[in-house]
Amino acid sequence: MRLLKQAFDMTPVQELSVADWADSYRHLPNTSRAGGLWKTERVELARGPMMAWTEPGVERISLCFAVQCGKSELLLNIIGRTAALDPSPIMLVQPKREAADKFSRERLAPMLSESPVLRQLFDQRERSG
């Protein structure tokens, strides 16, 4: 019966924007330049798209950013918030298999292991990329 209740859990999704979720729950590795708790104010350009992710009626978000301006971090915050508050399938496409492996290993895995709320959701021992 417990599994049935979990399968049909109709708990409403917590009303928290991606930016607010990241500011509260996302931790950056200590090896990064700005290790510790994520602060959207450091990448203010990403605030708009992160806010749009949970905006009612928004169906498409297009980004036109220069290189190295936080697009990957924005995507990681969306993945983290979705996994933590509204679990659903997510697909991130990379141009080559090597790029996908590198992103998973160097960006996604550290976010999952450094952020306590995500660490509880993902068993890093069971995944290999």
Image (tube, rainbow, N blue to C red):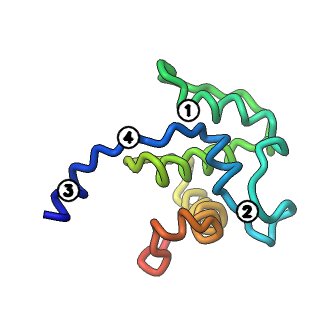
Label for residue 5? 3
Task: Report which residue position mark 4 lands on.
Answer: 12
Quadrant in the picture for residue 48: top right
Q: Label 3 sits on what residue type? A: Lys
Of marks 1 and 3, which one's residue comes earlier in the chain? 3
Task: Report which residue position mark 1 lands on.
Answer: 53
Label for residue 28? 2
Q: Which residue lies furthest to the bottom in this view?
A: 125
Q: Label 4 sits on what residue type? A: Pro
Q: In this view, does 36 lie above or below 85?
A: below
User: Distance of mark 1 from mark 2, alpha carbons?
Assistant: 21 Å
Q: Residues within 10 Å of mark 2 (few under 14, many from 20)?
A: many
Q: Indicate the secondary structure of the residue bearing disc 1.
A: loop
- Closer to the camera: disc 4 or disc 2? 4
Q: Label 2 sits on what residue type? A: Leu
User: Distance of mark 1 from mark 3, alpha carbons?
Assistant: 28 Å
Q: Which residue is drawn at 38% across and 47% down?
A: 88
Of marks 4 and 2, which one's residue comes earlier in the chain? 4
Q: Residues within 10 Å of mark 3 (few under 14, many from 20)?
A: few
Q: Which residue is drawn at 38% across and 48% down?
A: 89
Of marks 4 and 1, which one's residue comes earlier in the chain? 4
Of marks 1 and 2, which one's residue comes earlier in the chain? 2
